[in-house]
Image (cartoon, rainbow, N blue to C red):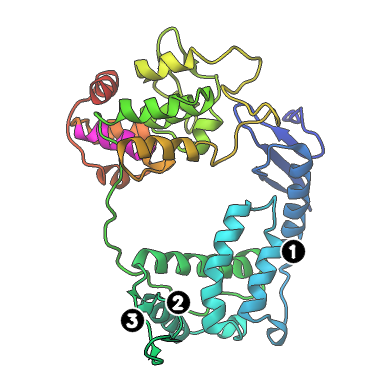
Amino acid sequence: MAKAETGWNKGLKKRNGSDYYSYRFYIDGQLFTGSTEQRLHKDALKELERVKNLAKNQMLGTSIAEDTLPTVAKAVEIWKEDNAVPVKSEKHIRTFGNAAKWFVKVFGNKRLDLVTNDDVAKLVREYVTPYDANKKSAKVDKKTKKVVTPAPVMRTRTESGCNNILRYLSLLYSHFVDTKKWISKRPFDINFLSEQEKEIRYLTKEELPVFFAAIDKTGNLHQSVACRFMVYMGLRENEALAAKRAGFNLSEGIYTPPKTKGKEAKPLHLHKELLLWLKKLPENKSEYFMLNEETNLPHTEGFTKKAVERGAKAVGRKITPHDLRRTCATLLCKNKTNALVVQRIMRHKSLSTTRKYAALDITDEAAAIDSAFG
């Protein structure tokens, strides 16, 4: 007989190498496991309760009569209630709300199961139709006493923006099909629009010293290190801010990622500039490199925004924190690094993502990183 796992507290446990609590519980002999995506035990307990109720409803096949189904507008409000913080982040809920305004505007009064392909087509047409962005109203000229109507300022919305609206519409229906099981399927098809390829913004090798000098001038060590994590390791901002000491060997200049699918990951070479700044961080007993002194937790997303804006201004460019990750991929590719090597450094799931940045030849990661950034 297998031994029961130890270390669980009210159905919750932080597994090795994870910031988040995992859950584990049984209903009628069926095991349910997963991640709460919560760092704090009290928040994880709330999420566990939500998951348990959801599991019970799924096992009971809970549904409601067609004539009591909500309208799309009401369904949006239900989604917001079911996914309120801490289930989803404030940013996620806000973005969903902005997208939902469009489908509420077009077919908000329709019952959830009665929305058609024609309704969705109307939504797409309304979104992509050029509109007058001039909000000034007509006024009487004081000299001529004539009514002056301001000239229209026509704008168009992008296919990418329209596709985001459609993705959130799909997300809304997934909640009522898969989670709440109020309807059996989505009553319409979603056909995404073809998007124009966006220009990839990045810093050139020559711009990096000027960019970093502007950031370092304020003396905020955590911002300086986080930005170098993004440039030299291709980390996303949240990954850079929550970077852990585990796996980093500063004396040898390598980083070994956690196991992937049960296999040992190959060590990655650390660029000398990043090493230099990591060694400037004071020693602490935390598993993280950087902690917010007030919360004793990693800094939250947006911490580097103003620093990146200062650096961008110094080089005369518009750059966001995520563009620093793009800088890493682009400079590696411009240095003719093999696409598979770039994919491994960037941790892209699909090689097609890597190929957007280009792809050619050097197979040695250490040589690739040193050569790309100097």
Task: Give the class, few, some or many, for how many residues have Cα within 10 Å of label 1's Cα (few <14, many ≥20).
Answer: some
Q: Mark 1 or mark 3, which is nearer the start of the sequence?
A: 1
The disc label shown at residue 103, or none: none
**In percent of the image, x 58 and y 68: which residue is there?**
172
| Element at label 3 | loop
Left of 80 or right of it: where is 26? right
For disc 1, the marked residue is 57
Image coordinates for residue 143, horizontal then vertical, percent = 39, 86
Query: Does 327 lie within the magenta span?
Result: yes
Question: Quick check: 247 above or below 148?
Answer: above
Q: CA distance from mark 3 to mark 2?
A: 10 Å
Q: Quadrant of residue 189?
A: bottom left
Q: Residues within 10 Å of mark 2 (few under 14, many from 20)?
A: few
Residue 30 image point, x, y percent? 72, 50
Left or right of 237 in this view: 66? right
Part of the protein shown in magenta: 324-334
Q: Between residues 327 and 46, which one lies in front from this camera angle?
A: 327
Question: Which quarter of the rendered picture does the N terminus lie within?
Answer: top right
Q: Which mark is residue 135?
A: 2
Q: Could you tell me if the residues under marks 1 and 2 are in contact, i.e. CB atoms within 8 Å?
A: no
Q: What numbered label is drawn on residue 151?
A: 3
* 142 to 15, vertically: above or below: below
Position of 12 with respect to 91 (left or right) is: right
Callout 1: helix, strand or loop?
helix
Q: Nearer the viewer, mark 3 or mark 1?
A: 3
Closer to us: mark 1 or mark 2? 2
* Badge 3 amino acid: Ala
